[in-house]
Image (cartoon, grey):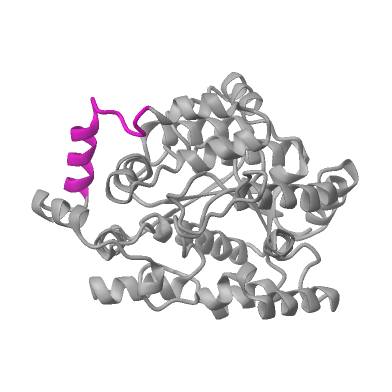
Amino acid sequence: MDTTDPEIYFDELGNCNHCNQLEHEKKTILRKLQNQTALKNLITEISNSNLNGKYNCVVGISGGTDSCFVLHSAVKLGLKPLAVHVDNGWNSEVAVSNIEKIIKKLDVDLHTEVLDWAQFKNLQRAFLRSGTKDCEVPTDHLIRASLVAVAKKYGIKYSLNGRNYSTEGIMPVSWSYGAIDWKYIKSVNKIIDGSRLDKLNGMNLFSQITSVFQGMKSISLLIYIDFDKEKSMELLSEKYGWQAYTGKHYESLYTKWYQGYYLFKKFGVDKRKAHLSVLICNGNMSRERALAELKTLPYDIKTEQIENDYIKTKLEMRQSEVDELMQAENKTYVDYPNNSLFLNGAKNKLVLDTLVILRQLKILPSGFADRAIAQHAAKKQDG
């Protein structure tokens, strides 16, 4: 990581706040969860839920490594998952093939939620025109909201996700904000485009809080097991015929363009820095090798024009519009109405203290907001 994140700072040893925070989270969270007892208790808890239903958990699946390995692990551990895929119109052929292969061989049901393309297209264009870095936020939010909606439909209380500390754990808020902030998403759309979003089922703050009090739990299954990315990819390839991608989250054609080209060209942000920093912190890559990789461009010059033309055509934007948005003033989420005061819990002591009390009173589940609390503790240690 470097100063392309305006909020970065370094300690006397030269370690940045992101790496220190990651190490603190791993020590506090992994110590508690990464053991056979914790995993056994989790599986028992999920298995004893929705006993009369066909499924006891939902698993969001994109066709990428993490989500496919979560689905594989859920079945291997004896759970009854319902796979859920949110189709936002940008699936690559490899993603579709990967999903089909693993669903068929695991013999699990697949629920596909297809977003209304007209409204979603307008929303994506609004975010591009907003001048912010948060152009993937609408997809991230609607995936979460869809998982909750499907879970409620089938009486399921558990949603399994692929978050892990093997390849993730560092992502500056200044690079991406708003995945759970529907107010922010609606505000950008209203100010920039003004079109309707009534066919896109987002979750406002009240709905999210209500779902927690109703017992809905999001479980990062890969944190409970010794997840090794490379070995997982080998297993998926050998067992299911799964195919890898050229970059993280590149199962989506839009994500590939957004992360590899748009962020880099417009903002000078290279998300590989965050991903590679995690690998360095975990001892899976040397700093020298990471720096060498960063000397290459995050996009392919040979296919740059083809991919740009595809994105432009699909979003129905003229080349002059694309040129204009690339040159427009850069903005952040603070330039639009949002709920960051509450949702950025790691920066809000009052919110964190309230969450801790609610956990102690067993109104909220014991593991709820573990990460935010660990982040706050790490910042206190940094002084």
* 148 falls in the magenta region: no
At x 78%, y 55%, the residue is 46
Question: Quick check: 227 above or below 3?
Answer: above
Residue 138 lies in quadrant: bottom left
Residue 195 can be seen, yes or no? no
At x 24%, y 29%, the residue is 303
Question: Over which residues does the magenta segment extend?
Answer: 296-314
At x 84%, y 51%, the residue is 32
Q: Looking at the picture, tell me which residue is in the foreground, 175 or 295.
A: 295
Residue 175 lies in quadrant: bottom left
Q: Quadrant of the C terminus?
A: bottom right
* 309 falls in the magenta region: yes
Furthest residue in direction top, as rendered = 238
Q: Looking at the picture, tell me which residue is in the foreground, 29 or 159.
A: 29
Residue 174 percent across, percent down from the top left: 46, 59
Residue 261 percent across, percent down from the top left: 30, 41
